[in-house]
Image (tube, rainbow, N blue to C red):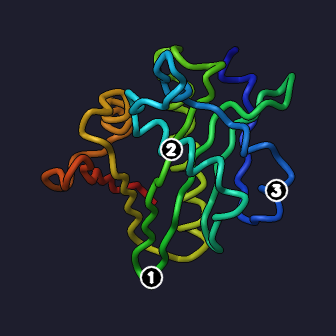
Amino acid sequence: MNLTDIRWSAITERTEVKKHPFHEFSCTEPYPRTPEGRKMPHPKPWEWTAQSIIRQSSRCLKAGSLLIVGWSNPSNEILAVAHAIPEVSTSLFSVHVAAIGVSRTVRGRGGSVADRTLEEVHSVVLENARESGAVDVVATANIHTRNFPSQRLFERAGYEPRSVPSGELQQWICRLDN
């Protein structure tokens, strides 16, 4: 799968989300189980959280929120999703990246699909900021302290830790050029 085989779209309406199988999107392994079948703690709870946010988007997408979706050109499969929550004031356009998930079918490709997903989020956010007339654009994300792949992803995109961790999460911030 080449990055050129992915087409991107931004979804802002919950009715549009309901037309697609986001409830089946899988970006992590299932919960491990004991031999007796009891569910054990997930080894990467941050991946489960991101998957849950994306799967529930048909019920939980709020007005103004965005789903940035990467679709496979040949099969129309959902390959990557980012859930972003923008806030607009008179001079500042801020967006919180609530979740980024890359489908298990394209995982392990050196982060290129995740990088491209975050680039697409920034592109859509900057376009919306220009339309709103905002002068400054800031993006934030809360990243689990043990989620080193996401930390590297956001660091490659220019984000920096904003504060000391609060529990298991740390806020990262990036100023985007408008």
Q: Which residue is mark 2?
A: 50
Q: Which sits in the foreground, 52 or 107? A: 52
First in residue order: circle 3 vs circle 2: 3
Callout 1 crowding tier (Cα within 10 Å): few <14, some 14–19, many ≥20? few
Gap between marks 1 and 2 measured at Cα: 27 Å
Residue at x-position 34% and y-position 56%: 175
Q: Which sits in the foreground, 44 or 37? A: 37
Badge 3 element: loop
Q: Which residue is mark 1?
A: 89
Q: Is residue 15 left or right of residue 160?
A: right
Q: Amino acid at mark 1?
A: Ser
Callout 2 crowding tier (Cα within 10 Å): few <14, some 14–19, many ≥20? many
Quadrant where the image shows the N terminus? top right
Q: Which residue is mark 3?
A: 18
**Quarter holding residue 106:** top right
Residue at x-position 36% and y-position 39%: 154
Above or below 131: residue 25: above
